[in-house]
Image (tube, rainbow, N blue to C red):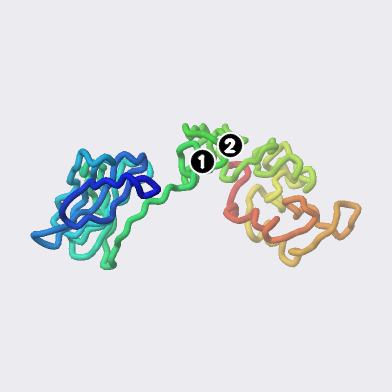
């Protein structure tokens, strides 16, 4: 019927009809139909105008709750054919019926959820190698975790994200390194007095807890200004905000302990 309740039309007759769901494009309706001779519910599909009625399942059990996938390529449903309700999926013509769940609990009422795709490139954010940049081809020359479209160091694989303005691909911008006091054009120290990588505080080319992260012990919460302030530990202020904090500075070490600047 229309949204105002007019032009009502009967599409099916007989049986016990339920769980009707429109296809995403509005051209078809999937529904469950049950009736004699026994407790059986099967899945059917019909055109929105009442034509092209098709039975999709012939399982011989209670199989209600059809649910279209967002792209209309699959229909999920529940069935108790194995004794308790499990979730199944099939193609929209009824082929390819596959059981998805298998446990002692009752699994029912399937509901598809479209995954977030913030850049609208057809690749879900959860697997997109550049979730904020349109890149449907997902090209990734260096094979690291970031695609060429957002990787500011696309020819060198790095275990960390390289931000815009990071000339030496060490994970810190030139502006930040100039503030901290490290060499913004080299990712690794060339000798015992060459401070090049902000995370490598003891300049041994590796990031470790004992050699680097422990410098923050007893210093969290310190705030000040750049020299000539004699009490300001500017070398530890990795986000250049004039305060040493866990979230702003120490957390840079998360997931990077054991990394070697000579082998990014």
Spot occupied by residue 229 in the image (x, y as percentages of width and height): 89, 56
Left or right, 225 with reference to 264: right
State which quarter of the image contains the C terminus.
top right
Earlier along the polypeptide chain: callout 1 or callout 2?
1
Extreme-front residue of the structure = 6
Q: Which mark is residue 117?
A: none
Q: What residue is drawn where x is 56% and y is 37%?
A: 133
Q: Quadrant of residue 71?
A: top left
Q: What residue is drawn where x is 53% and y is 43%?
A: 118
Q: Nearer the viewer, residue 65 or 106?
A: 65
Left or right, 223 with reference to 170: right
Q: How many marks?
A: 2
Q: Which mark is residue 129?
A: 1
Q: Are marks 1 and 2 in contact (CB under 8 Å)?
A: yes
Spot occupied by residue 70 in the image (x, y as percentages of width and height): 38, 44
Badge 2 density bin: few <14, some 14–19, many ≥20, Cα 10 Å: many
- From what the image shows, is residue 129 above or below residue 108? above
């Amino acid at each position: 019927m229309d949204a105002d309740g007019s032009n009502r039309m009967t599409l099916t007759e007989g049986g016990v009809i339920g769980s009707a769901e429109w296809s995403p494009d509005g051209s078809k309706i999937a529904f469950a139909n049950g009736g004699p001779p026994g407790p059986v519910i099967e899945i059917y599909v019909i055109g929105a105008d009442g034509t092209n009625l098709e039975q999709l399942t012939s399982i011989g059990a209670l199989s209600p709750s059809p649910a279209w996938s967002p792209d209309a390529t699959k229909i999920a449903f529940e069935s108790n054919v194995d004794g308790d309700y499990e979730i199944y999926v099939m193609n929209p013509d009824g082929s390819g019926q596959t059981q998805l769940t298998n446990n002692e609990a009752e699994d029912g009422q399937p509901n598809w959820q479209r995954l977030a795709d913030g850049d609208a490139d057809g690749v879900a954010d959860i697997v997109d190698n550049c979730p904020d940049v349109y890149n449907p081809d997902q090209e990734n020359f260096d094979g690291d975790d970031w695609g060429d479209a957002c990787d500011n160091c696309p020819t060198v694989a790095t275990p960390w994200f390289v931000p815009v303005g990071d000339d030496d691909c060490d994970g810190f911008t030139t502006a930040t390194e100039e503030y901290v006091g490290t060499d913004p054009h080299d990712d690794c120290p060339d000798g015992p007095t060459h401070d090049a990588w902000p995370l490598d505080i003891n300049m041994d080319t590796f990031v470790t807890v004992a050699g680097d992260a422990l410098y923050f012990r007893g210093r969290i919460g310190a705030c000040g200004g750049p020299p000539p302030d004699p009490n300001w530990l500017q070398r530890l202020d990795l986000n250049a905000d004039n305060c040493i904090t866990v979230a702003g500075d120490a957390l840079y070490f998360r997931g990077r302990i054991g990394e070697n600047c000579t082998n990014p």
